[in-house]
Image (cartoon, grey):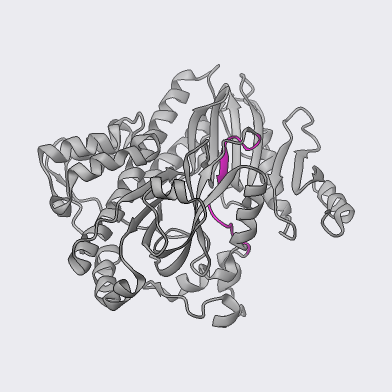
Amino acid sequence: MQPKNLKRLLRALERQGLDVSYNNRTYSVRLVNSPDAPVAEVLLPEGFPVEAKALKQLANLASVRHPSGGCVCRACATPDFHPGDAGVAIGSIVETVGQVIPGAVGSDINCGMRLHVADLTIDEFMAKRDQFVEKMKGDYFFGTRDVTMTAEAMRSLFQYGIPGWLDAMLDRVTGSVIKSDLQQLAQESERIFLGGSMDGNWKLAPEELVPDAGIVRDGGLATIGGGNHFVEVQRVDKVENRPLAHAWGVREGQLAFMIHSGSRNVGKYIGGMWRDKAKATWQKGLKYPDSQIFPLSTHSHPELVASYLQAEATAANYAFINRLLLAELLRLRLREVYKDVEAPLVYDLPHNITLPEGKGWVTRKGACPAHTGQPVIIPGSMGAYSYLMVGKGNPAFCNSASHGAGRIRSRFDLNRRGASQNEAELGLIGIDCITLREERRIEEAPAAYKPIQSVIDVQVEAEMVDVVARLSPVLTFKA
């Protein structure tokens, strides 16, 4: 079934310099003046808006080619596709050969999802809900958390990620981690994408976080962050793949704890620095690309490509630890309030990252890996279901899946003068959102997001993922 007024839509997009066609819920797009660029494909459920700005951003990304050699050989986007603030659409995926594109990852390097489950009923949780929330507010909002590190531990986490950090903690445990089960954390590394470890270099981290000796008090660690980041308490509402759910330790009626956060200020530091470096290395006298997206080429600057990938990995390692500590603070508070609660990890996986795949690298921006048999976590809004999925490794979409429902209304639109603040219209009736800023409830209201069910259904039909379990929201922490 074609969208209504398809011909009119395609003509309008052509006037904006886009060559767009439509077939079977997939839009194919390319810049009119870049006939040699790969055609980028966007999977969208019927009835979803087609945003010209996002299509233009994806077409620009697909056409990125370094004059010294290197190109995009494949580009696509997931159904949560929408415009990005930095010129790259959220939901974009590109496979590159001979070049990497720092701007395609952006500053929130290894933004990702983490999911735990606990054998705690909703009634048991709600009986002590207020006590639990007050403790978590202290940790997440008021700085009562203690995540002090030795200088050695900080260098190790940047260099080696979770395994390096754990080794340093075994030598000298600090902060609230002294109450943690380090053996449990080590075993859970198997349930983290890449084992929570990439090839980093602590010398590429912000200087103030890697002193020669002493104790480091990093105010960014174990923080949720702004935007669409959150920590959410959920209930396992329905299991659809019982054998797989059983293997992953997931059962109906359990509580679940979903964490969405990334590399915080470390990612901003590294992402911003390398976008500037990529621009600075552009050949003198050569016109800048119209998109202002600057790649790094292995042909002209192989050392810079290697250094960028190591810097990105350094921020990614920090993000793995950030999510682990957010979860560990929560797990420690669960044990304080509800006593013998295990809350094991189901999985932790990244978005916004460059990985060696295919012929070169695959860069995902607001999309997650969905390789065959791999757990995939796709959240809805704080008023909608979230889903635990399993990847099917679909090469047509670079073995990827969406990282959420995707915004349909901008934060500015929701907060502008004259915008409706009606709770019912915003979908906020019955929503338990824990935040210190009322505008965060408005910005992240369910009405700001696309319908998650359509996003899930179209990816299942496209054989990108399958549903394992459905999770319903209980309460959400928003910084």
Name the image quarter holding the N terminus: bottom right
Q: Is residue 262 visible?
A: no
In magenta, the rendered stretch is: 396-408
Asked if residue 282 is positioned above or below residue 16 in the image, the reply reads above
Q: Is residue 336 left or right of residue 191?
A: left
Q: Considering depth in this image, is 393 or 147 the residue closer to the camera?
A: 393
Q: Nearer the viewer, residue 86 or 372?
A: 372
Name of the residue lying farthest toward the front: 243
- Which x, y percent locates residue 453? 61, 60
Q: On the rendered structure, is 100 left or right of 130?
A: right
In the rendering, at what x and y percent does residue 157 appear? 26, 38
Image: 206 above or below 228: above
Please, is residue 197 above or below residue 411 in the view?
above
Is 405 in the magenta? yes
The quadrant of the picture occupied by the C terminus is bottom left
How many marks do you count on the picture? 0
Position of residue 305 measured from the top left corner of the image (x, y, whole percent): 47, 25
State the residue at coordinates (18%, 35%).
167
Magenta span includes 278:
no
Instruction: Name the chief secondary structure element in magenta.
Output: loop
Q: Residue 58 lies in what quarter of the image? A: top right
Percent across and percent down for residue 100 are 54, 29
- Which of these two is toward me, 135 or 344? 344
- Residue 440 visible to an observer of this rendering: yes
Residue nearest the observer in this picture, 57 or 407: 407
Residue at 60%, 79% (x, y): give it. Answer: 425
